[in-house]
Image: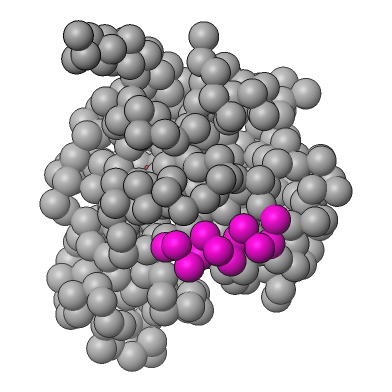
Amino acid sequence: MWNTWLTRSLDIDLPILGAPMGGRAGGELAGQVTAAGGLGMIGAARYATPEWIDEQLRVIRAAAGESAPLAFGLQTWSLAESPELLDSVLAEAPKLVSLSFGDPAPFVQRCKDAGAVVISQINSVDDLREVEAAGVDAVVAQGGEAGGHTGRIATLPLLQEVLRATELPVLAAGGIGTGAGLAAVLAAGAQGALIGTALLASPETVGPDYAIPALLKARSADTVYTDVFDKARHQPWPTRWFGRALTNDFTARWHDGDGAVPSSGTEEAVSAAYDGTMPEVGVVYAGQAAGLVDAVRPAREVVESIAADAEARLRAVAGVLD
Ligand SMILES: Cc1cc2nc3c(=O)[nH]c(=O)nc-3n(C[C@H](O)[C@H](O)[C@H](O)COP(=O)(O)O)c2cc1C
């Protein structure tokens, strides 16, 4: 029986959150993670709408029951321009809200007033100080190996730094795709983990048809930290957050930086060359855990097997001490 801050405060069986993944994690995926004993988050990207949220609610209730606990992940930097997204999320009295990428201060109290536990994914100790001041309940140390938008410090050094720097409960995200990864971050002191990439070959994901085959083919080195897809899709992310995606013909052509500086193609040129319907061009955000994903598996099975393997490893690890 798992007993961490995450399982206690959300009243769930497993110390696992299904990561909010804009464009990939809708109601069906979230519902299956929740049915497995974790809590699945619906990823509401900047381009999500209240109508899309309503549709996901219908789906999750069909998958996990009318009283299914709800959890949403929002992109903080874009919330000021689309306040209706937060309104429609909070109207559903979610159990958990993730406010990531940006200062959550203007929104935290409203989430708490709606009864939600509030977490933020952070990429540095400076971010930690910002979200602590905003009053979040817990932080997620999100390492640069994560899929989707993320920072530049890897999960393990960031997690150690954040654990040392705060009294808040700390969760880990980025590169955790098996029970070994979950056991490692829990042993380090994390109270749970967000699983993203490892769920992306689940039939319950949404997104283009080519996304799952591309992920199955990809190995851990086949990702790139880049801004080219944001330019291509006119998503004005602050430049401190690039996104980690699978490499393809489009990144080979347009990603000319080393991931530390913006790529040189103009938004006009890059977007003119982009076609999200074409497998070798369209974006598949995914992290370095891509190398751990080699079969289509239902999300429920993925979550259950990660938890069972982590449990066995943590029970066995006591044996390293005499
Ligand atoms: C396809 C994709 C989309 C994502 N979209 C979001 C998002 O909209 N909001 C957010 O907070 N994080 C987003 N993330 C980051 C995840 O919440 C999480 O940090 C990451 O998946 C964890 O690392 P992993 O992919 O190695 O498991 C996304 C990740 C992926 C793979």
Q: Residue at x 29, y 70 (%)?
A: 226
Front-lying residue, 234 or 121: 121
Front-lying residue, 163 or 78: 163
Q: Residue farthest to the front?
A: 322
Q: Quadrant of residue 276?
A: bottom left
Q: Is residue 56 visible?
A: no
| Residue 127 sits inside the magenta stretch | yes
Q: Is residue 40 visible?
A: yes
Q: Is residue 164 above or below residue 41?
A: below
| Residue 209 sits inside the magenta stretch | no
Left/right placement of residue 246 relative to residue 75 reads left
Q: Position of residue 98 (x, y in %)?
A: 61, 50
Front-lying residue, 73 or 297: 73
Q: Residue at x 30, y 83 (%)?
A: 262
Q: Position of residue 284 (x, y in %)?
A: 33, 55
Q: Quadrant of the C terminus?
A: top left
Magenta span of residues: 124-135
Most frequent secondary structure within the magenta stretch: helix
Left/right placement of residue 192 relative to residue 113 reads left
Q: Is residue 124 above or below residue 34?
A: below
Q: Residue at x 67, y 29 (%)?
A: 9
Q: Total of numbered circles in the picture?
A: 0
Q: Quadrant of residue 225?
A: bottom left
Q: Position of residue 73 (x, y in %)?
A: 60, 50
Front-lying residue, 132 or 172: 132
Q: Position of residue 237 (x, y in %)?
A: 48, 75
